[in-house]
Image (cartoon, rainbow, N blue to C red):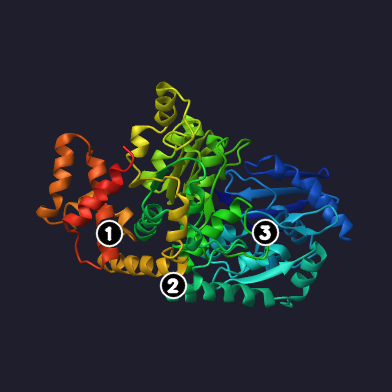
């Protein structure tokens, strides 16, 4: 009997840290002791691991068992450590070769009968293991496709503890077809990102398409501009005018995620336990639409008991966050969006430390013109008082609306408009082609910079290398003089103007683009 070492991964947000697990089986009063700043789930692992070993026909050492998780100062949470602890104890007791368990990284929860159960966060954990130099990772069979997305990593899927011990004793690598299947998914994502249009269909069963939206040409144009430049959008209109239909179709206009983005987005959803069954890799921009009763923790992220989970803003990373009936959301929830909109990330501070999640998304707000939603509707008189209307829309603060690039008013379409517009409504594939061309122009212009689309460009660049001609700035200068345009609003108008120029195939915005961009920014004011 001696000391044996294995490795596992502790997740801090979506970042993994390698944890070395040492097990010592030696003389002394029989008992099991865990050390290393552990939460309740890991402290309870001694019961799960002991039962799993006994029910898998392995004896539990009749000696003093000490299990240490290093680094001791790093908080460790969850049941992902069960499998590594069990293997370390078996190796220390001489049941498996200690040298065979030192290199692989073991991830998984154990059932009392010895089954290896799936866990959250396998993808970011496997990424951290690969970055730390690991060549082999052992995961539950259900999570194998997830882990196999990491390039250069050998994935060993196991269903039971006994199966894993047999492999460690024999060294016979088997059951790896899932690795090739997952690797093909990553290659396919790369191909779709290169071709662009082959991945424009949304990955669900609803087959949403822009041609379904009739009678709203202004809304469709605003959606195209937002997709091309990554801009935020506010739509104001009565119920039934098509605001939700428009918002749901924005992801169909966005280019597919490239392989790095797909891994990043999939890692966030893996930590949250939201990866769809059978789809370990998300190749389309995600779409999140939380209910207006959602709490700040649900939208921004948080949790209790030391477990911090990503919120809707992080689950919408590289995609779309849609807040329908935006004024109905709590003020604290709406104001909490301001920081991630500026920085592209959200930092959650707790007594145990801080966790940072990525949160670069396109925000869409939808609102009715008044609490009853009937203001300005023909044949449906609004009974809301002027004070009630002001209070309703005042829930969307000026600083928040100042971060919205495009604002449009959506009205109810008449029967004649619906019939006539169906001949002009374009399918998503046609609009997505123009969006892709515009994004390609922006990408060539921004090559060598940290920005990927016009919405990301810094203020210094807008007034420096990307400064538009003085003649095109005339309408913006008038807005600054009149006080209808803020300094931040000026930058956002310029970003939209660049997007309009990209859609028009121009090398630089002119006065028509800046005037149109200003109108979009002022929109419903």
Measured Cα–Cα span from mark 1 to mark 3? 49 Å
Compared to residue 399, the image places residue 161 above or below, namely below
Q: Looking at the image, which residue sits at the far left?
A: 470
Element on which disc 1 rests: helix
Compared to residue 434, the image places residue 266 above or below, namely above
Sequence-first disc among 1 and 3: 3
Pointer 2 residue: 196
Q: Quadrant of the N terminus?
A: bottom right
Question: What residue is drawn where x is 72% and y is 42%?
Answer: 43
Sequence-first disc among 3 and 2: 3
Q: Would residue 203 be seen by someone viewing this image from the given angle?
A: yes
Task: Residue 138 in the image: state x and y as whole percent.
Answer: 68, 65
Measured Cα–Cα span from mark 3 to mark 2? 35 Å
Residue neighbourhood size for the residue with mark 3, other residues' Cα within 10 Å, grouped as few (<14), some (14–19), many (≥20): many
Question: What residue is drawn where x is 61% and y is 35%?
Answer: 304
Task: Residue 273 in the image: state x and y as whole percent.
Answer: 64, 52
Element on which disc 2 rests: loop
Residue neighbourhood size for the residue with mark 1, other residues' Cα within 10 Å, grouped as few (<14), some (14–19), many (≥20): many
Q: As rendered, which of 61 and 130 lies closer to the eye?
A: 130
Sequence-first disc among 1 and 2: 2
In the picture, the disc for residue 107 is 3
Task: Residue 103 in the image: state x and y as whole percent.
Answer: 63, 66
Taking the image as shown, residue 512 lies to the left or right of residue 186, namely: left
User: Is the Cβ of the residue at disc 1 closer than 8 Å to that at disc 2?
Assistant: no
Pointer 1 residue: 500
């Amino acid at each position: 009997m001696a000391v044996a070492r294995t490795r596992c991964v502790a997740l801090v947000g979506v970042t993994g840290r390698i944890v070395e697990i040492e097990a010592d089986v030696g003389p002394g009063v029989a008992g099991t002791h865990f050390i290393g700043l552990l939460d309740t789930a890991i402290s309870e692992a001694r019961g799960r691991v002991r039962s799993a070993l006994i029910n898998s026909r392995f004896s539990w050492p009749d000696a003093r068992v000490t299990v240490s998780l290093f680094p001791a100062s790093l908080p460790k949470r969850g049941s992902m450590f069960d499998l590594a602890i069990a293997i370390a104890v078996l190796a220390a007791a001489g049941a498996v070769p200690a040298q065979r368990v030192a290199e692989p990284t073991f991830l998984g929860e154990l059932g009392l009968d010895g089954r290896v159960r799936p866990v959250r966060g396998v993808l970011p954990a496997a990424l951290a293991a690969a970055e730390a130099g690991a060549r082999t990772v052992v995961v539950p069979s259900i999570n194998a496709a997830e882990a196999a997305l990491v390039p250069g990593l050998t994935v060993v899927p196991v269903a039971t503890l006994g199966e894993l011990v047999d492999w460690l004793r024999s060294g016979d690598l088997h059951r790896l077809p899932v690795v090739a299947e997952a690797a093909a998914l990553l290659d396919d994502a790369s191909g779709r990102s290169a071709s662009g249009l082959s991945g424009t269909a949304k990955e669900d069963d609803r087959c949403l398409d822009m041609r379904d939206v009739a009678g709203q040409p202004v809304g469709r144009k605003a959606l195209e501009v937002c997709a091309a430049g990554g801009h935020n959008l506010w739509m104001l209109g009565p119920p039934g005018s098509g605001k939700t239909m428009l918002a749901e179709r924005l992801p169909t206009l966005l280019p597919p995620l490239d392989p790095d983005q797909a891994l990043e987005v999939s890692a966030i959803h893996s930590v949250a336990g939201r990866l769809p069954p059978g789809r370990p890799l998300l190749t389309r921009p995600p779409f999140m639409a939380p209910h207006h009763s959602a709490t700040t923790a649900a939208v921004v992220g948080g949790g209790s008991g030391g477990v911090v989970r990503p919120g809707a803003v992080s689950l919408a990373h590289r995609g779309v966050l849609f807040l329908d009936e935006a004024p109905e959301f709590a003020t604290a929830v709406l104001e909490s969006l301001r920081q991630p909109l500026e920085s592209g990330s959200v930092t959650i501070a707790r007594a145990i430390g801080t966790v940072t999640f990525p949160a670069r998304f396109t925000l869409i707000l939808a609102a009715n013109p008044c609490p009853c939603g009937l203001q300005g509707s023909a044949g449906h008189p609004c009974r809301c008082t002027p004070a009630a209307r002001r209070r309703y829309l005042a829930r969307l603060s000026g600083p928040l609306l100042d971060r919205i690039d495009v604002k449009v008013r959506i009205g109810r379409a008449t029967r004649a408009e619906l019939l006539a517009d169906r001949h002009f409504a374009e399918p998503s594939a046609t609009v997505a082609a123009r969006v892709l061309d515009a994004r390609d122009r922006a990408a060539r212009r921004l090559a060598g910079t940290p920005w990927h689309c016009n919405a990301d460009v810094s203020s210094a660049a807008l007034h420096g290398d990307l400064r538009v001609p003085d003649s095109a700035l005339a309408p913006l200068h008038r807005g600054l003089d009149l006080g209808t345009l803020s300094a931040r609003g000026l930058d956002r108008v310029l970003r939209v103007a660049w997007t309009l120029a990209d859609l028009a195939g121009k090398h630089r915005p002119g006065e028509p683009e800046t005037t149109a961009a200003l109108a979009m920014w002022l929109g419903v004011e």
